[in-house]
Amino acid sequence: MSAHFLAVDLGASSGRVVLGRWDGERFELEELHRFPNEPVQVLGHVHWNVLGMWEQIQLGLRRYRQQHGRDPSGIGVDTWGVDYALLDSAGRLLGPPYHYRDVRTEGIEERAFAAVPRERIYARTGIQFMAINTLVQLTAMVAGDDPQLRHAGTLLMMPDLFHYWLTGRRLAEYTIASTSQLLDASSRDWATELIEVLGIPAAIFPEVVMPGTRIGPVLPEVAAEVGFSGEVPVLATGSHDTANAVAAVPGLDAESIYLSSGTWSLMGVETAEPVLSARALELNVTNEGGVEGTIRLLKNVAGLWLLQESRRQWQREGHDYSWDELLALAAEAAPFRSLIDPDAPEFLGHGDMPATVRAYCRRSGQPEPADVGAVVRCCLDSLALRYRWVKGALEELVERSLTVVRVVGGGSQNRLLNQLTADACACPVVAGPVEATALGNVLMQALASGHLSSLAEGRAAVAASVELERFEPRPDPALRAAYQRFETLLG
């Protein structure tokens, strides 16, 4: 039975509304509307323009109805993780949500650890320690006696905010809630005791629902605004974009590593239960919620943010390089000449990324990348070597060999990085689909509405719907020495 599903896919730099057609065997995607999602700086702080996003989402829904003349079978929303909105007791937005790169979290992690030891936080949540986590952001609000937090009636993670504006229901979808570092990894509900010890009001956290839940119909006033004529269900997908992307990884099995490659690189494996050992804490891996009851045991790596921010700097300087031009210059540059730790704190923020890369190399006693190609090659070599480190960490934790890396997302188009990853990890890399997040969103809607019987059936349908590219590892005698240098940088 055929169906039309609308995927609202909001990333940290752009958003879009995508039509997913299901013909009973394959998926076909059509991008209906794309829009920039740029943060807004106000009085020294960085915020998300959620009202602008909401306007653009409605425009995309309206465009679907105008072009296709029928109501969709469902709508699903996914976004990046960790960020949230605060509503008052009447459900009104208290202010523009903060961006995870805002400076207010600087130095706040130590305050949280003073209240609750790292080991205790990890044993409950299983989430990687990062200064951007919701736990840290809320601790910053507690430390600053933020009036928004004092007057908050409900906290909604970003996709849950749009679920609420679509349906009027205030809920927390499991996969996005897990990114907060405030969800109990074992019970899969809010870690209330931890929340209260940190001084965060526990009453603001809504009911947790699982992927596949029917949240409710689109509100009549929203339906009238976008032109829907009947009752259109809003369905909880893997509302964290990475959860949707992993849902759409073809061939994902016990021997596979997934790598969702975009602004961030999310590299991990699917498990049935969280891994909360002392060694997992030491390696700082994360146990995020997945679809169909799974755990995504993974490591967050800086990803293509390094190149995106570098490209913006070169544009500011008057050089508008295309991605193909940047990769061609990198392919001509000397390999492994200079390396960085992609996850070093100085690479997290906005600014002159090429200058930051050069400064890092200078401080670490390495040659400074002298030109554009050298900077890009430094970043790509370093990402590939970081992936090798993560592969080793995952193999240690799950106690088995992982023999293939399956890359999805926008970064799967980066053929040079795919090949470098295959070389560094000494295993094949299978690239695709590019549109994994939107496909996973649509797949989960099809599963929730009974058009698919299982996740495995959905992944097989994705494999039948896209073309995949395979990269075989090449022997490189320089890799061993380069990796030893890289491990030294990691300390």
Image (cartoon, rainbow, N blue to C red):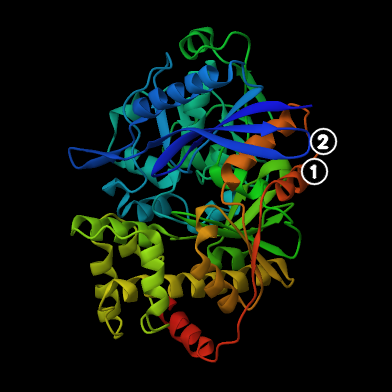
Tell me the kind of residue under disc 2.
Ser
Q: Disc 1, disc 2: CB below 8 Å? A: yes
Q: Which residue is mark 1?
A: 457
Q: CA distance from mark 1 to mark 2?
A: 7 Å
Q: Is residue 14 above or below residue 168?
A: below
Tell me the kind of residue under disc 1.
Glu
Q: Which residue is mark 2?
A: 453
Please count the marks in the image: 2
Horizontal arrangement in the rendering, residue 232 relative to residue 110 (left or right) = right
* Residue in the image at 36% along x and 70% along y: 376
Residue 92 percent location from the top left of the image: 39, 17
Quarter-wise, where is residue 401 in the image?
Answer: bottom right
Quarter-wise, where is residue 455 in the image?
Answer: top right
Q: Is residue 59 above or below residue 241?
A: above
Residue 308 percent location from the top left of the image: 36, 57
Q: Is residue 491 above or below residue 65?
A: below
* Label 2 element class: loop
* Label 1 element class: helix
* Residue in the image at 20% along x and 55% along y: 316
